[in-house]
Image (cartoon, rainbow, N blue to C red):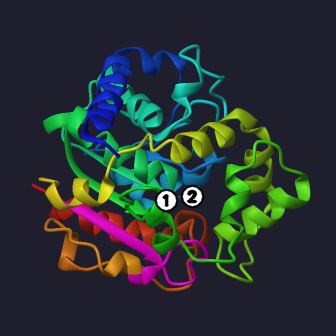
Amino acid sequence: MAQDSKIAIYSWSISHILNSRRALGPVRRGEGEGRPVVLVHGNSSSSRVWQALIDGPFGARYRCLALDLPGHGDTPPPAAGPDAYSVPGFAAAVAGFVREEGLRDVVLVGLSLGGHAILEAADALGDAAVGFAVFGTPPVRDGSSFAEAYLADSPLGIGFQETITREEARTYAAGLLAPGSAVSLDPLVEDILATDPAVRAGIARSIAEGRFADEVALVASLDRPLAVLHGEEEQFVNRAYLDALTVPVLWRGAVQVVPGAGHAIQVDRPESLADLLDSFVRDLP
């Protein structure tokens, strides 16, 4: 991607930050009063995937806030137009949310698309954010790196289809979990089918047009701690790709693998995720 294109993307993103929050729906909030933790879901999902984490000891300790990205959950399609359905657009929504909530010393946690959004929001958030944790989120350089970052023969491609059937939604939902997981697919399927179909088309279009940052360079120059987590039974993301990344601020110096978890660790293994995130937050300044 040309440098001037990257500048244009960030200019668009920053110019929309203050207006993005108004397009977001209700926020799920925990009872905790500790350091704020913003939870950002993935493609064709919603804030309810974080409910087990919010209802558990982690949510009792920290001030958890889980939002619905534009076009997902209870958030309506944005008035800003189709560009809102791109990684820079979702990053702007996250940064706008943090600013409108007046959050400081905040930790951002993102799954998949949510992880890409919080990484690309890092510069706009400035010193309001003190740490980032992602899973199911392989930082990519450009379109060609997707083949390295993601596993072949996975149902990931369904997440880029504008129209999907209920059967396809179940296939995609099953891919979010560990193979053979006992977790019910029904809530995941309902979130997928409730998502504005233009979300998936918009993400696919923005990727094809190269409208996202060089995230490999971004994590190589990040100046705040980054925790990279990975479900041992992950069906979408290539673990070897994550291990090969250069991340000077990588928490504990390595990708943290969660046994028995798939792509959506917070659904498969919420207690394990809570323990890891608690340790990460405690390690932050």
- Report, in whole angstroms, how far the alpha carbon at label 2 lies from the one at label 1: 6 Å
Tell me whether circle 2 and circle 1 mark residues in contact (CB < 8 Å).
Answer: yes
Residue 61 appears left or right of 169: left
Q: How many marks?
A: 2
> According to the image, label 2 marks what residue?
52
Q: Residue type at mark 1?
A: Gly
Secondary structure under tag 1 reads loop
Quadrant the C terminus occupies:
bottom left
Question: Residues in magenta?
Answer: 224-240
Q: Which residue is at 25% across, 40% downward?
A: 3
Q: Which residue is at 66% across, 64% downward?
A: 156
Residue nearest the observer in this picture, 30 or 199? 199
Magenta stretch encompasses residue 235: yes
The percent coordinates of residue 85 (x first, y second) are 56, 33
Q: Residue type at mark 2?
A: Ala
> According to the image, label 1 marks what residue?
56
Crowd class of label 1 (few under 14; some 14 to 19; many from 20; radius 10 Å):
some
Residue furthest to the front in view is 2
User: Which callout, 2 or 1, points to the residue nearer the camera?
Assistant: 2
Crowd class of label 2 (few under 14; some 14 to 19; many from 20; radius 10 Å):
some
Q: Which residue is at 75% across, 77% downward?
A: 182
Q: Which residue is at 35% across, 58% downward?
A: 141
